[in-house]
Image (cartoon, coloured by chain):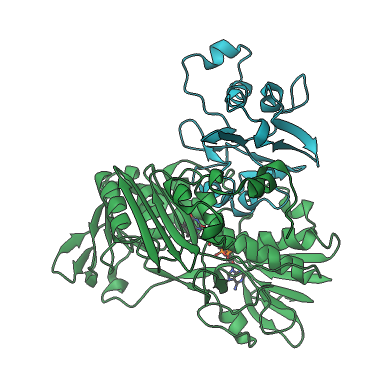
């Protein structure tokens, strides 16, 4: 068997480890346009901050490709896939044949048209190791940095660079930060915390026009800056897949085995959609754990094993300047909210299920809540009042605990 | 492989397992010096309420969600034992978000996480919490 994986990140690693759990011998080729050994993408902000370095941010050990018998073709882009002839065409003219193909192409930054953006000389995305390296080489203690986008990537960038520069300003169209994972109250707590560190926000605002190093905002504010970081949005990399007739919505459409509509072609990670069980809808869940687990499912399936990925939910664990946030699921339903000092908790239930939660500050044992969502645990089968107080196994029945902790077998 | 199992009927709620755990991971060979007047950070934790108590520590799952979810590659399974490479961990707490048992926790200063790594590298060949449990409510067995 000849497996080819386009992309060399979390989904690709999941696929390799998945294939190897079933098929020790098949040939695996990984092709990526980034010239690096597989690294942890979320760590690019920690690299600038100084909490990691290029060696430690490797997602798998140096011997990973060798240990797994993988041919890694790094630093070369795939230009096209010839599905009929079952081969992949590279930008350097090489061709790589495949029996089974995985798209693990991730996502690319999306930059909407903005007046005068061409005039800005020093502008950066914040998606790749190379982006971080270039940005780092341009930063100095006098830099004034303007970040467009108050989502996860923009704010992680702000955290990473704040201590290295003079000023960081963040502008976003949305009226609050992290709008896709936080409600209004939670968002305000986190915004205040980040502001206290020295980051300045302009929310419900946008750049009407750039004039060289000045951004004129919609509300008339003029901001001078030296470096511009564009973190407005990302778009799944679906071009190659669409080119051979894979069904693409926002991301590449896949079933529970991560198979596309074309035989022998699979997709995993940020380039694909999976079924979010909290809303029962296909969505792009652009998160590393999701990418790994989709990739693993694809790999096992490609190698002839049996695996379904049917517990996908949005879930985020992220910290800013020491304040931790864990969120999961969706927030449509009956809410239970507790606010104590800088700790914030929201739990949302519907139809006898926990659908989502937000924890800010005290995030201890959050996984117990996550598992209620993923496992669709009926809330009347546990002591919900008790578990609302804090995540604890005490809220389960003694029989269930005997399974979880005592090694007893589950009857069903 | 051998894992830690608890039998809550026999748990006295004495918290000795927590002390033995903290001591085993303190790097010290004097229990009094290691623990006296110190707020301990054990990797095994007792839950208790109205006469029921039991210890919770890493299950060393065969399909470890924490390892699959770890964004840095710091959590790895080595012959079934799940351990964290503190050098690689950045304290993002993704593992805390995903562990269904709540068995991974922030380390002492919160900058990395900590968890039970089945400390069997001692004279008894079994984890310290198992050794220290006076009522055999925590056992180390192949099941
Ligand atoms: C700054 C930042 C912080 C983040 N923080 C978190 C976090 O805290 N938690 C979390 O869960 N997620 C986080 N994420 C998201 C996480 O990084 C992604 O979900 C994850 O990397 C997705 O993995 P993937 O394998 O799907 O794709 P990607 O990591 O996007 O990798 C795609 C790969 O495909 C290659 N590729 C694409 N097209 C081609 C082509 N035509 N030819 C050859 N190669 C190609 C690329 O070079 C790349 O190697 C963060 C992302 C960023 C940018």
User: Where ligand 1 lies, by quadrant?
Assistant: bottom right
Say if B136 sits above or below A31 in the image. Answer: above
x and y, in percent, of residue A162 in the image: 33, 46
Q: Residue furthest front?
A: B51
List x then y, in percent, for residue A258: 66, 73
Instruction: State which quarter of the image contains the C terminus of chain A.
Output: bottom right
Position of residue B100 measured from the top left corner of the image (x, y, whole percent):
59, 50
Which of the 4 image quarters holds residue A76? bottom right
Q: Is residue A97 visible?
A: no
**Across the whole image, how many numbered discs are drawn on residues?**
0
Farthest right residue in view: A25
In the rendered image, the residue lying farthest to the left is A220
| Chain (cyan) | B
Determine if residue A342 is in view.
yes
Residue B19: quadrant of the picture: top right
* Residue at image coords 57%, 73%: A275
Left or right of A226 on screen, residue B128: right
Q: Which residue is located at x 67 percent, y 42 percent? A: A405
Residue A33: percent from left, percent from top = 60, 66
**Taking A308 as reference, is B135 above or below it?**
above
Q: Nearer the viewer, residue A405 or B53?
A: B53
- Name above or below for residue A71 compared with residue B38: below
Quadrant of the frame with the N terminus of chain A: bottom right
The residue lying toward the viewer, choosing from A391 and A71, is A391
Taking the image as shown, residue B66 lies to the left or right of residue A342, namely right
Q: Which chain is green?
A: A
């Amino acid at each position: 068997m000849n497996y080819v994986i386009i992309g060399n990140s979390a989904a690709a690693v999941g696929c390799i480890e998945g294939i190897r759990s079933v098929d020790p011998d098949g040939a695996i080729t990984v092709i990526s346009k980034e010239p690096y050994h597989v690294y942890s993408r979320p760590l690019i902000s920690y690299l600038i901050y100084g909490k990691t370095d290029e060696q430690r941010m490797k997602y798998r050990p140096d011997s990973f490709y060798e240990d797994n018998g993988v041919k890694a073709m790094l630093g070369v882009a795939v230009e096209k896939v010839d599905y009929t002839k079952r081969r992949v065409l590279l930008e350097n003219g090489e061709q790589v044949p495949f029996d089974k193909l995985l798209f693990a192409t991730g996502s690319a930054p999306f930059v909407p048209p903005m007046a005068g953006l061409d005039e800005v000389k020093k502008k950066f995305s914040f998606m790749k190791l190379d982006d971080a390296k270039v940005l780092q080489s341009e930063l100095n203690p006098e830099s004034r940095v303007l970040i467009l986008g108050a989502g996860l990537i923009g704010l992680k960038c702000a955290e990473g660079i704040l201590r290295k520069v003079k000023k960081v300003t963040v502008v976003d169209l949305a009226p609050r930060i992290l709008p896709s994972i936080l409600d209004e109250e939670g968002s305000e707590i986190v915004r205040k915390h980040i502001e206290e560190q020295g980051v300045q926000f302009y929310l419900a605002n946008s750049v009407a026009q750039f004039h060289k190093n000045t951004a004129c905002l919609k509300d008339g504010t003029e901001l001078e800056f030296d470096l511009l970081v564009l973190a407005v949005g990302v778009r799944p990399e679906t071009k190659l897949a669409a080119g051979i007739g894979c069904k693409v919505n926002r991301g590449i459409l896949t079933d529970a085995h991560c198979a596309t509509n074309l035989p022998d072609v699979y997709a995993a990670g940020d380039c694909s959609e999976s079924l979010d069980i909290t809303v029962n809808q296909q969505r792009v869940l652009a998160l590393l754990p999701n990418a790994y687990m989709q990739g693993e499912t694809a790999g096992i399936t490609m190698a002839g094993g049996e695996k379904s990925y049917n517990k996908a939910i949005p879930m985020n664990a992220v910290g800013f300047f020491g304040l931790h946030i864990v969120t999961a699921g969706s927030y449509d339903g009956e809410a239970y909210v507790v606010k104590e000092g800088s700790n914030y908790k929201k739990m949302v239930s519907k139809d006898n299920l926990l659908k989502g939660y937000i924890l800010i500050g005290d995030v201890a044992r959050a996984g117990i809540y996550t598992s209620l969502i993923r496992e669709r645990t009926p809330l009347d089968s546990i002591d919900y009042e008790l578990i609302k107080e804090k995540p604890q196994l005490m809220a389960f029945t003694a029989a269930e605990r005997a399974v979880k902790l005592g090694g007893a077998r589950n009857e069903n | 492989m051998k894992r830690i199992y608890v039998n809550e009927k026999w748990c006295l709620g004495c918290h000795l397992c927590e002390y033995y755990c903290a001591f085993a991971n303190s790097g010290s060979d004097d229990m009094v010096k290691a623990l006296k007047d110190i707020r301990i950070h054990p990797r095994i934790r007792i839950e208790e309420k109205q006469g029921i108590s039991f210890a919770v520590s890493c299950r060393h799952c065969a399909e470890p969600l924490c390892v699959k979810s770890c964004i840095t590659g710091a959590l790895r399974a080595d012959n079934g034992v799940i351990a964290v490479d503190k050098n690689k961990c950045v304290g993002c707490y993704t593992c805390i978000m995903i562990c269904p048992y709540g068995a991974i926790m922030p380390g002492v200063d919160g900058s990395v996480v900590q968890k039970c790594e089945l400390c069997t590298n001692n004279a008894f060949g079994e984890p310290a919490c198992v050794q220290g449990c006076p009522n055999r409510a925590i056992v180390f067995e192949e099941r």
